[in-house]
């Protein structure tokens, strides 16, 4: 059938008309100004009758100017209407292919993030050509409009029904959990189409053949999904119509000889291509107008996002640098006092640790907002993960003098997720409970299995949360107030991080409180893994490593305080340590010290730590040295760069003493001859 010619207005012509009318308005206003000046001059020279004639002429000129302005406003409205109309099918009013492309890209991005599916239904009406030829184009148009309306009523609001052209439609189903779920929707669509009983006052029987494809099973782009669904649809049509075929069910079947395809099917496919091309031409008229502005806006947002990420990374690096000598000095003081610390030194350490945590949270916010969070998904034992979370939160809980009640859960309780990120989520909840509970309070941690889900609850008897606050508490940078008007410390991002990280792993988080002064309870849920035997705790293998005091270590850091304080700590640990604050000063030092371990700051002047390591290796190929990167930058890219440059480890400032001890022992063990190791 042929489409009506009442398509979207010609945008280019409308823009030219609008420009011409604006020019005429400007010219008319200039003429009006000259006329008014002439009128004032003539008023003193001519009589009343002539003056009335001039006023009448002026009035006509004003009316002409008003008509021109009205025409200009109408043209502007027509231009906006053309833009909106260009996103719709001219006959049915359904979204066109350009809208489908955008929505499919969004749906695939969402499915990729949450590990779900997207389904595409290719719907082709059976015997439509015969209806159109027998009843006429008007009846055919009514059938197409009715089919579109019936299909829209059969799917969810979040799904998209689009007319490709001719008698072919596409339905995009988002967030499809299981492969078989689209079958129910197809049944509703076929039933709705079959309920159409008349067109143009004539009885009709309408049915359709449907092909179904799934992301990522059958393709990862819209074109691939349409192609797979189209093949399945033609198989359904050859099976008699009024049915559907899943694309995956065609695997292994022998394709029919193309020569044997019916002539009508080939003609319909050609009509689809022609109609689709017409729609694309009409849509491109509007898209060309918007593309330049959209591209500029997108590029600007990308530039600002990169600038923000770079700013946060540099800020974190610059804040970590002064913290490094503080932490090393605290470690040295503790070692000199036999492992104990005064209350004042403990307070300094707590606040330094808090600052480091705030910087880590800020970087996590940046990664989440730009979609750069990388998860290491594996089988997670919940009891081991909770033990790690408790260890992370213990300093804050003990500082407030709280009782933390936790009965270890069943060792067989497991899920799939990132154990580090899960522990971070639980520790954030525990730290929040400690922070918002008066000193000497009670915090309860519980984990178990409910409805095939791992459920973790953190409950406290603290300040509680009002209903208004609870509605916003998972938003980034939202901070609640206490029982009075005082604000509680923090950036307001802990709970927002919990929600984002849990949702990335297919879970949920929710909060509950009976009100202010009634305490609060937060619940995490993630899908459980069942049928996996409980893993017995690994028995530690004890090895006698080379004595720590036998290590010769060179530290190169342009921050003299950081280098000297770290050297003091390592010296108290029994190592022989040399320091340099410039790359050039490092070369004679290494030749003299013959080090086994070299700790290099990456951000050095003249040459960075990577370049310095390369030159040291070239100058001293005879030395067996381990290289350790020390930096305020700790992203995945930074760690990968260190690994690619053959560094043995990448430490982030300020480094923890226990982490440093463990690393040095491990590096020493690598060089120790096998004959000297005893189990």
Image: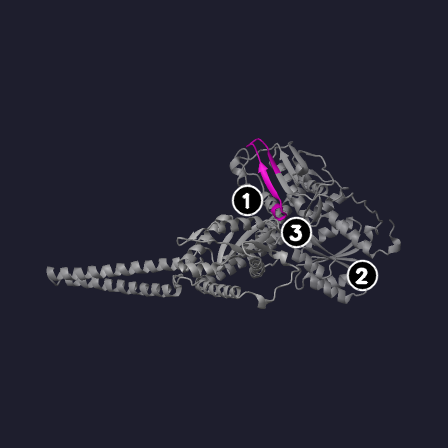
Mark 1 crowdedness (10 Å alpha carbons): few <14, some 14-19, many ≥20: some
Q: In terms of depth relative to the viewer, which is nearer, 594 or 544?
A: 544
Residue 24, can we see it?
yes
Q: In percent of the image, x 53 and y 41: which residue is there? A: 472
Mark 1 secondary-structure assignment = loop
Outermost bottom residue: 259
Outermost right residue: 675
Left or right: 422 in relation to 26: right
Mark 3 secondary-structure assignment = loop
Q: Which residue is mark 1?
A: 475
1 or 3: mark nearer the eye: 3
Q: In percent of the image, x 17 and y 63: which residue is there? A: 41
Left or right: 536 in relation to 372: right
Left or right: 40 in relation to 30: left
Q: Earlier in the sequence, mark 3 or mark 2?
A: 3
Residue 285 in the magenta stretch? The answer is: no
**In 3D space, how far apart are the residues under numbered discs 1 and 2 (Cα atoms)?**
52 Å
Q: Earlier in the sequence, mark 1 or mark 3?
A: 3
Q: Earlier in the sequence, mark 1 or mark 2?
A: 1
Q: Which residue is mark 3?
A: 375
**In 3D space, how far apart are the residues under numbered discs 3 and 2 (Cα atoms)?**
35 Å
Q: Position of residue 555 (x, y in %)?
A: 73, 56
Residue 504 in the magenta stretch? The answer is: yes
Mark 3 crowdedness (10 Å alpha carbons): few <14, some 14-19, many ≥20: some
Chain part drawn in magenta: 502-522
1 or 2: mark nearer the eye: 1
Q: Position of residue 591 (x, y in %)?
A: 78, 63
Mark 2 secondary-structure assignment = loop
Using the image, tell me which numbered label, if any, was put on residue 624. 2
């Amino acid at each position: 059938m042929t489409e009506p010619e009442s398509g979207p207005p010609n945008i280019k012509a409308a823009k030219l008309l609008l420009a011409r009318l604006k020019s005429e308005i400007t010219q008319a206003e200039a003429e009006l100004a000259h006329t008014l000046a002439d009128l004032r001059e003539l008023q003193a020279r001519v009589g009343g009758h002539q003056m009335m004639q001039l006023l009448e002429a002026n009035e006509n000129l004003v009316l002409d100017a008003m008509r021109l302005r009205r025409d200009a406003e109408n043209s502007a409205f027509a231009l906006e209407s053309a833009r909106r109309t260009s996103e719709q099918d001219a006959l049915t009013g359904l979204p066109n292919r350009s809208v489908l492309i955008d929505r499919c890209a969004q749906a695939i991005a969402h499915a990729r993030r949450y590990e779900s599916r997207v389904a595409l239904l290719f719907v082709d009406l059976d015997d439509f050509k015969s209806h159109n030829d027998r009843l006429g184009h008007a009846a055919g148009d009514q059938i197409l409009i009715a089919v579109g309306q019936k299909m829209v009523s059969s799917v969810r609001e979040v799904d998209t029904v689009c007319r490709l052209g001719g008698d072919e439609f596409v339905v995009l189903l988002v967030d499809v959990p299981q492969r078989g779920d689209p079958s129910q929707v197809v049944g509703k669509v076929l039933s709705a189409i079959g309920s159409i009983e008349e067109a143009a006052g004539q009885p009709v029987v309408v049915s359709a053949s449907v092909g179904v494809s799934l992301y990522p099973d059958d393709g990862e782009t819209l074109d691939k999904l349409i192609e797979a669904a189209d093949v399945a649809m033609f198989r359904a049509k050859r099976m008699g119509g009024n049915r559907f075929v899943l694309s995956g069910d065609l695997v292994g079947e022998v394709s029919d000889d193309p020569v044997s395809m019916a002539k009508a099917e080939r003609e319909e496919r050609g009509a689809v291509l022609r109609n689709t091309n017409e729609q694309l031409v009409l849509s491109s008229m509007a898209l060309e107008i918007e593309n330049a502005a959209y591209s500029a806006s997108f590029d600007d947002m990308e530039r600002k996002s990169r600038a923000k990420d770079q700013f946060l990374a540099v800020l974190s690096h610059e804040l970590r640098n002064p913290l490094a000598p503080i932490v090393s000095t605290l470690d040295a003081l503790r070692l000199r006092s036999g492992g104990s610390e005064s209350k004042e030194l403990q307070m300094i350490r707590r606040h330094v640790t808090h600052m480091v945590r705030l910087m880590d949270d800020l970087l996590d916010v940046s990664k989440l907002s730009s979609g750069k969070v990388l998860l290491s998904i594996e089988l997670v034992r919940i009891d081991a993960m909770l033990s790690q979370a408790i260890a992370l939160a213990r300093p804050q809980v003990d500082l407030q003098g709280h009782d933390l009640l936790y009965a270890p859960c069943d060792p067989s309780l497991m899920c799939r997720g990132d154990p580090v990120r899960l522990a971070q989520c639980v520790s954030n909840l525990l730290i929040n409970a400690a922070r918002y509970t008066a000193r000497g309070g009670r915090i309860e941690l519980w984990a178990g299995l409910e409805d095939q889900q791992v459920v973790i609850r953190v409950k406290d008897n603290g300040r509680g949360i009002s209903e208004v606050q609870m509605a916003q508490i998972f938003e980034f940078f939202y901070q609640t107030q206490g029982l009075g008007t005082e604000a509680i410390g923090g950036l307001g991002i802990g709970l927002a991080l919990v929600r984002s990280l849990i949702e990335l792993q297919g879970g949920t988080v929710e909060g509950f409180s009976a009100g202010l002064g009634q305490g609060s309870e937060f619940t995490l849920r993630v899908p459980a893994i069942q049928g996996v035997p409980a893993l017995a705790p690994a028995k530690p293998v004890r090895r006698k490593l080379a004595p720590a005091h036998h290590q010769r270590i060179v530290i190169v850091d342009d921050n003299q305080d950081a280098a000297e304080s770290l050297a003091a700590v390592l010296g108290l640990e029994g190592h022989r340590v040399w320091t340099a604050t410039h790359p050039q000063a490092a070369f004679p030092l290494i030749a003299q010290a013959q080090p086994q371990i070299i700790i290099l700051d990456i951000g050095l002047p003249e040459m960075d730590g990577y370049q310095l390591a390369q030159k040291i290796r070239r100058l001293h190929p005879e030395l067996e040295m381990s290289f350790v990167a020390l930096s305020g930058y700790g992203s995945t890219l930074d760690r990968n760069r260190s690994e690619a440059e053959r560094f043995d480890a990448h430490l982030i400032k300020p480094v923890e003493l226990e982490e440093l001890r463990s690393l040095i022992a491990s590096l020493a063990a690598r060089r120790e001859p096998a004959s000297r190791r005893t189990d």
